[in-house]
Amino acid sequence: MCPRNAVLLAVAAALLAGAAARAADHREAPAVNLDTRADISDVYVFQSPAALNRTVLILTATLGSGSDGASQFNPAEYTVNVDNNFDEKPDVTLSWRIGGATEGGVQPYEFRINRPARGGQGESIRRRGRVGGEVMLPGDARAYAALTDDPFFFDLPAFIGETTGEGERRFCDGQETDSFAGTNVAAMVAELPSQILVGESSSIQVWASARTASAIDRMGLPAVNVLYLPEGDKDAFNATKPRQHDHRWSDVVEETLLLMSAMGPSPYDPAEAAAIASVLLPDVLTFDTRSGAGFVRSFNGRRVDEDVMDRQLAILTGGFFGDKPALETDCVDRNDVPLPTSFPYLAAPHQQQGR
């Protein structure tokens, strides 16, 4: 290995060491790692397979445990934010307020949709339910909160080997393993008519947020904080609202792209890195409610079955414009169990497993 590549590998390993350490439970930032009640695992938004004029939104979060050690939701409030006029401010919010478990092990939740004022007062719709069940809302909308299988899939030991040079594992080495197989998440799902979410156009921007007294987490696109932000910036990135992302974090993301792409055969130049950063920031999922195309194909929302980590690793290491990246695939291309094609679109939980 030439000296320049050795230096690049060392710097890249330092950059991604924190990502590798935390990727196993999506706890991408130090404060969230200490207070996992605020930890968002993933966010999804896609066109309903049952009706093309309906949208599905899913937020998954890290599980807590009850007094008996069984996995349960953390008592917290989780919010999916929807911006329908592209000013990176919420116009519609969907929130799940999770209560503590009763002596019988029942966890209540309140689901709430807040919509903007339309020629007068705004609108708020609330329904109460129990974790493990769904609630129905006007317009044949429905919401759900339950433990489910984690639909995220990735070969974490091979990722650590590729980015740090340590251990024997590498991508596509014949020992491919979904590191998230058999794990559960706290899943919150809503399916509703798209007209409730949109403004003057059919497109929206979506991100999730959760906050406690000691931590805040925000997430839109898959793994942006994990892959593109250095360890010391991760908490500050989470605390930054999407409308501030371009101004504050573009230079950091561009530097990461220049560094990581230089490891492979297709390094970006500064103009290319700036163009990619403008796609990754603000960290929101842009979704055209009339389109079924997903994140991998066209950065349109995110379906639960998509191999988003292959796409992000290729972008990170030189493959955004179709060139060969340094990291192309982990050779794990699907969830460990089949995903249903009907509500709630997530598989049943594994027996007493948590993250």
Image (cartoon, rainbow, N blue to C red):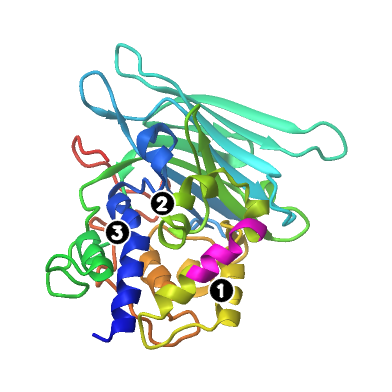
Q: Which image quadrant for residue 312? A: bottom left
Q: Label 2 neighbourhood size at 10 Å, few (<14), some (14-19), many (20+)?
A: few
Q: Earlier in the sequence, mark 1 or mark 3?
A: 3
Callout 1: SS: helix
Look at discs 2 and 3 and give the one toward the viewer. 3
**Distance of mark 1 from mark 2, alpha carbons?**
34 Å
Look at discs 1 and 3 and give the one toward the viewer. 1
**Nearest the eye: 142 or 36:** 36
Quadrant location, the N terminus: bottom left
Give the vertical position of 9 relative to 222 (above or below). below
In the rendered image, residue 21, in percent from the top left (x then y), is placed at: 28, 52
Q: Which residues are magenta?
A: 247-255
Q: Determine whether, in the image, residue 127 is placed left or right of residue 120.
A: left
**Which residue was labeled with disc 1?**
276
**Distance of mark 1 from mark 3, alpha carbons?**
24 Å
Look at discs 1 and 2 and give the one toward the viewer. 1
The image's mark for residue 342 is 2
**Which residue was labeled with disc 3?**
153
In the rendered image, residue 18, in percent from the top left (x then y), is placed at: 33, 54
Q: Label 3 neighbourhood size at 10 Å, few (<14), some (14-19), many (20+)?
A: many
In the rendered image, residue 307, in percent from the top left (x then y), is placed at: 36, 66
Residue sitting at 56 percent across and 26 percent down?
127
